[in-house]
Amino acid sequence: MTRDEFDAFCGGLTSTSHVVQWGGSSVWKVGGKIFAICSVWGKGDHTKVSFKCSDLTYTVLTDQPGIVPAPYLARAKWVQVEDPAALDDDGLRDYIGAAHALVASTLTRKARRELGL
């Protein structure tokens, strides 16, 4: 998934906002809370995607080659897809959609109602 495809997908999710920060990272939020990030980090010149996940998903994904605990965010159960071949685009979209839903579920009822979630 390219960064443009990542941005287009995240932008199509309900009540998202986008900022570019941290050295040009594409950061996507719902209700002001981050659920996915895309940028070039560390070794290699390809984009890497990081996203929030459940405890179980975190455990499963970090056992797969090419997916690691996300730097600085692993304690909050974030993973980073370092190898673009580790997940196909459909799988990545599914996990990003789940990250959006997971983060949205932590918002207050009032905030979810105001955002149409």
Image: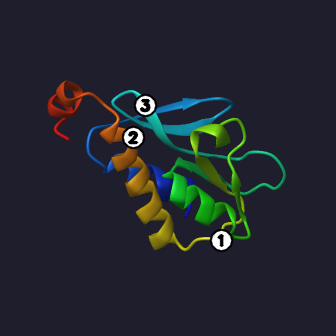
The first of marks 2 and 1 along the sequence is 1
Residue at the spot of label 1: 86
- What secondary structure is marked by label 3? strand
Q: Secondary structure at mark 1?
A: loop
> Which label belongs to residue 112?
none
Sequence-first tag of 1 and 3: 3
For discs 2 and 1, the disc positioned in front in the rendered view? 2
Residue depicted at 53% across the width and 52% down the height: 55
Q: CA distance from mark 2 to mark 1?
A: 23 Å
Q: Amino acid at mark 2?
A: Val
Above/below status of 112 relative to 39: above
- Residue 46 lies left or right of residue 93; in this view the side is right
Residue 59, given in percent of the width and then of the height, sits at 61, 60
Which comes before the other along the chain, label 2 or label 3? 3
Look at the picture and state if 57 lies above or below 26: below
Please name the amino acid that badge 3 sits on: Lys
In the image, 114: left or right of 81? left
Q: In percent of the image, x 58 and y 71: which residue is there? A: 87
* Local crowd size for mark 3, using a 10 Å CA cut-off: few (<14), some (14–19), many (≥20): some
State the mark number for residue 103.
Answer: 2
Q: Is residue 104 above or below residue 8?
A: above
Please report contact status of discs 2 and 3: CB closer than 8 Å, yes or no: yes
Q: Position of residue 91 (x, y in %)?
A: 48, 70
User: In the image, is residue 32 above or below residue 104?
Assistant: above
- Residue beneath disc 3: 33
Q: Amino acid at mark 1?
A: Ala
| Quarter-of-image position of residue 32 | top left
Q: Is residue 25 visible?
A: yes
Where in the figure is residue 47, as x and y percent of width and height? 67, 54
